[in-house]
Amino acid sequence: MTRKQMTASLLVLMTILTACSSNSGTTAQTEPGKTNESSGAAPGMSAKYDPPVTVTTVRAQADITEFAEGDSMDSNIWTKYLLDTYGFELKNTWVTDSAGYKDKLNVTIASGDLPDFFKVDATQFKQLADAGSLADLTDVYDQYASDLLKSRLNEDGGITLKAATIDGKLMALPYVTATMDGAGMIWIRKDWLDNVGLPAPKTMDDVLAISQAFTKNDPDKNGKDDTVGLGLTKDIFTGFGGLNYFLNSFHSYGKMWIEDPKDKSKLVYGAIQPEAKQALSKLQEMYKAGEIDKEFSVKTTTQLTDDIVAGKVGMTYGIMANPINYLSKSVAKDPNAKWEMYQLASVDDQPAKSQISSGIGTFWVASKKSKYPDALVKTMDAFVQKLFSDKAEFKYMYDGPNLEFHTFKYMDVQAWGARKNLDAYLAVNSALQSNDTSKLNPEQKGYYDQVKAYQGGDASQWGTFKVFGPEGSLSLLEKIVKDDLMYPDQYFSTPTDLMVQRQSTLSDLLDETYMGIILGDPVDTFDAMIPKWNQLGGEEMTKQVNDWKATQ
């Protein structure tokens, strides 16, 4: 798909969203949960191993994953469903946290002892494909993927499926998700804003004033100097707790390819452009002033969440899902905590655009040695069937007395489609207005029930209410999409050989330089880093990216 086609697709998407906002909750597609969402399985879909077999995988456990008593990552609602439905017991050879997954998987790849199927990033995918280590999934996909799964994997125009195809053979199942869900927002304690007498931010100067006031003006009114303005983690080029969206406010972009401002026909790497210096200089000032935790350079997402729950942090960057994933624990501990989301502010009179992924970067692959490559397809199909078909059950998304078990996290192999959450928001709010839930699929009905429960006084449902409710984060996302305030990575292909060889080194150089400047290195260190980046492969990589662009 060319860049022009991608732009056209976004324009079409905006038109669809506009139409959805004014109708009764259905989209331009068939109503959720109806015919095209439940068109049945492909021939052989129900094929079940008898006697049962063991299928191996490896995986990362999502942050803040909780289990009911007796359940674990090895035995839960999803593993039981796979065994009962398809006759295979899914065995985790190992489980690690999200931060350690890539390195641990690299060790497994180097050993040559691969599980039956597993998740890889684009670099690992290319390495394994080049080495001839992957199973061809073309036939098992055609046989076992339902129409529902195929439709979900094509909602992005087939971009990611194309990236998963090599020499006409499907060598992986891509992760198709709503890249728009990654659009950045500022999450701020509104109760603290009121305490320090400041309005909602409209400019970057407003954001900086809020950070200062949250640090110096005792925003929690406890008489102690125990708060910081901006919550960050050591992973600075990320969304929640990272700095990508802070950079975006200065029209700077992290580790992604952008159009050259001087020549739109060419691409340049965002993280080495001069706009980053102004952002880094400001971050250095904030760090020196105590507005950023002195220990942030070693803090994980979990540790930042702990600080938020403890009432030490009043502002952080993130996305629409943060109330469910992180902020709900803050509200549960302190009912007075009022977290609100705000659009990214700009440093000048030009609107800030949030960087988003191209959508290509995560794949699930099967080992060429595996006897059960079909198990991968069946696992992904199970995910969409139990969440999005007319046979879906909400307990496979959330479960527990207070829906505290995010059961969808127990399933590693996922396919969401390009606009699932925004569709759900539109459908739920249409139902809230009409009191008619007949057009909701089971997942949407679950969100509807949680929103109604919160409105009826059940404070435990705040997270869902703050995402899917009438003034939830998806209402801001809808505005961001309509106003064209997203900037996608302009390189949407698998990595070149050079990227595979040098990306880690180049990425480390950027991490060290950015972190060093924030912690006190001269800001001009940024300029000295650029020649190193080019010499270590960045210059040749840029040439390869532009050679690719010339073919689009």
Image (spheres, helix red, strand yellow):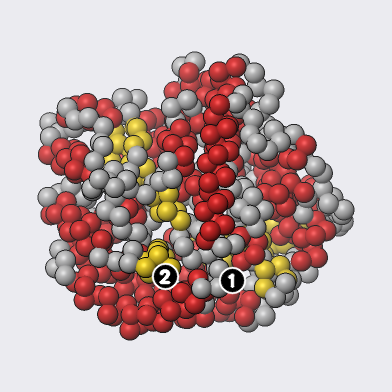
Q: Is residue 19 or residue 353 the one in the foreground?
A: 19
| Residue 435 lies in quadrant | top right
Q: Number of callouts in the render?
A: 2
The residue type indicated by label 1 comes to Phe
Tell me, yes or no, if residue 227 can be seen here: no
The residue at 27%/75% (across/down) is 530
From the viewer's perspective, is the residue at label 1 or at label 2 nearer? 2
Q: Amino acid at mark 2?
A: Lys
**Disc 1 on helix, strand or loop?**
helix
Does residue 161 appear to the left or right of 203 in the view shown?
Answer: right
Q: Residue 301 in the image: state x and y as whole percent.
A: 37, 51
Q: Mark on residue 266?
A: 2
Q: CA distance from mark 1 to mark 2?
A: 27 Å
* Quadrant showing the N terminus: bottom right
> Can see residue 268?
yes
| Residue 133 falls in image quadrant | bottom right
Q: Mark 1 — residue?
A: 125
Q: Which mark is residue 488?
A: none
Q: Nearer the viewer, residue 41 or 305?
A: 41
Label 2: how many Cα within 10 Å (few below 14, some 14–19, many 20+)? some
Where residue 25 sits in the image (x, y, percent)? Answer: 61, 27
Q: In the depicted view, which residue is nearer to us: 139 or 215?
A: 139
Residue 250 lies left or right of residue 492; in this view the side is left
User: Can you give x and y, in whole percent of width and height, for residue 117 in the image?
Assistant: 67, 65
SS for callout 2? strand
- Classify 205 as above or below 441: below
